[in-house]
Image (cartoon, rainbow, N blue to C red):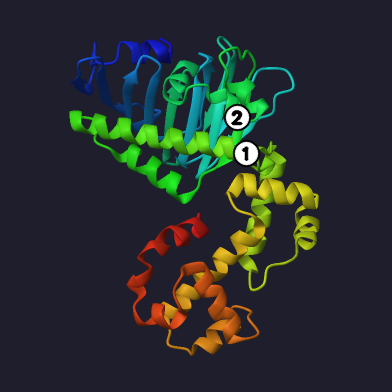
Amino acid sequence: MCLQDVFDVLGDDPGGSTVSRLVRPNDTLVGATHQIRTDAGNGHCGLVRLASDLFVLNTNLSFQKDALCPVIGEDFIELHFRLSGRLSLYPESEGAETVDVDKGSLLIWRQPQGMNIMERLEANERESSMTIYLRPSALERYFGDYAASLPSAVAVGLGAESNGLFFLRMACYPRLIEQVRELWSIDIARSRGLVQAEALVMMILCEVVSMLEDAHDDSTSLCRLSDVDVRCLRKARDLIRGQYTPPPTIEEIARAVGLSATKLKSGFKALFGKSISQYANDLRMAHALELLRKSDIPILLVAEALGYEYQNSFTVAFRRHFKVLPKDYRRDPMILADAAPLLACCDS
């Protein structure tokens, strides 16, 4: 049975699933959670049908050995958010490259009807993901002539007339990740949970469409990355994590990881959602928070530890970043309760 059929009959034959329904005057929302226990793996998945052309699949699985299975193309537009584990896709079309999707990644994916792709999931790792499946008709219903505001390559790949394989890797920003995690964790066994899921899907779609529209003014958001590129960019990120006070120059990083400066800059922002300077500055400011919160060394020495020649330069940079003075944060760390997403992003 193909995935479209599964969503179409969702709730008709529970087969061990826990099913919830919310009947409304013009539509019915349906959710189902299903426990999976086999010799190959175990866990659970959640399925939500919000409309005939809009669905959600949440997974939380673990496999005893690497799982390799064919995925038949059904011409969905898929927004695949990888929360843990690693997914590798092997397109069968000639000249297509393997696509790896790691933790914290968004893969926008459209697989033509009948085109096969092999999907590989690694053993002994918790595999958590959330995928929104939709048709162009769903985008039109919510966003009107959505293609008119998108970059041409994306408009073609997501358009109603598309007939080719389309992959686009994009960055997951903290606000988007927070919404995805909330949707992933909703109890869809309750009818009210279905309403929450519907609202969050709309918010996530708005975020993603906005990101695609912004790519008109920032072509780096649409950088196509090979597996080799991704490995080099992760190496660049590791270099910056080890030296961000101050960070090495673009040219030094490019030479160290084997990329051109142009590819390094555009690819880093596409994969991690920030420029190299932004990423390094976030690391530096996160370190500043740690030093101010967990030690009593003078602010002058904090500034020196972060590579600032003058305390005033550090104070200006800290205030520009957090809108508060270092001394005020030290006095009351709760004044920056919203800094948690920054720390989580730097650790991801």
Residue at horizontal 67%, vertical 54%? 235
Q: Which label was assigned to residue 215?
A: 1
Rendered image quadrant of residue 186? top left
Q: Which structural element holds mark 2?
A: loop
Cα–Cα span, label 1 and label 2: 8 Å
Density class for disc 2 (Cα within 10 Å; few <14, some 14-19, many ≥20) is: many
User: Do the CB atoms of the residues marked 1 and 2 lie less than 8 Å apart?
Assistant: yes
| Of callouts 1 and 2, the N-terminal one | 2
Q: Check residue 202 in the rendering and tell me which mark sits there, or answer none.
A: none
Looking at the rendered structure, the secondary structure element under dot 1 is: loop
Q: Determine if residue 48 is in view.
A: yes
| Residue 82 in picture, x, y percent from top left | 48, 39
Left/right placement of residue 340 relative to residue 302 reads left
- In percent of width and height, residue 310 lies at 62, 86
Query: Residue, x 59% and y 49% (percent of image)?
Result: 272
Q: Amino acid at mark 1?
A: Ala
Above or below, 46 against 207 in this view is: above
Q: Amino acid at mark 2?
A: Leu
- For this view, does 184 lie left or right of residue 319? left
Label 1, residues with CA under 10 Å away: few <14, some 14-19, many ≥20:
some
Quarter of the picture holding the N terminus: top left
Whether residue 60 is visible here, answered yes or no, is no
- Taking 39 as reference, is 256 above or below it? below
The relative height of residue 101 versus residue 314 in the rendered view (above or below) is above
* Residue 202 locus on image (x, y percent): 38, 32
Q: Nearer the viewer, residue 347 or 63?
A: 347
Residue nearest the viewer, comparing 327 with 188? 327
Question: Residue 20 appears in which quarter of the rendering?
Answer: top left
Number of disc labels: 2
Q: Which mark is residue 150?
A: 2
Q: Residue at x 54, y 39 (%)?
A: 211
Residue 46 in percent (x, y) is at: 32, 28
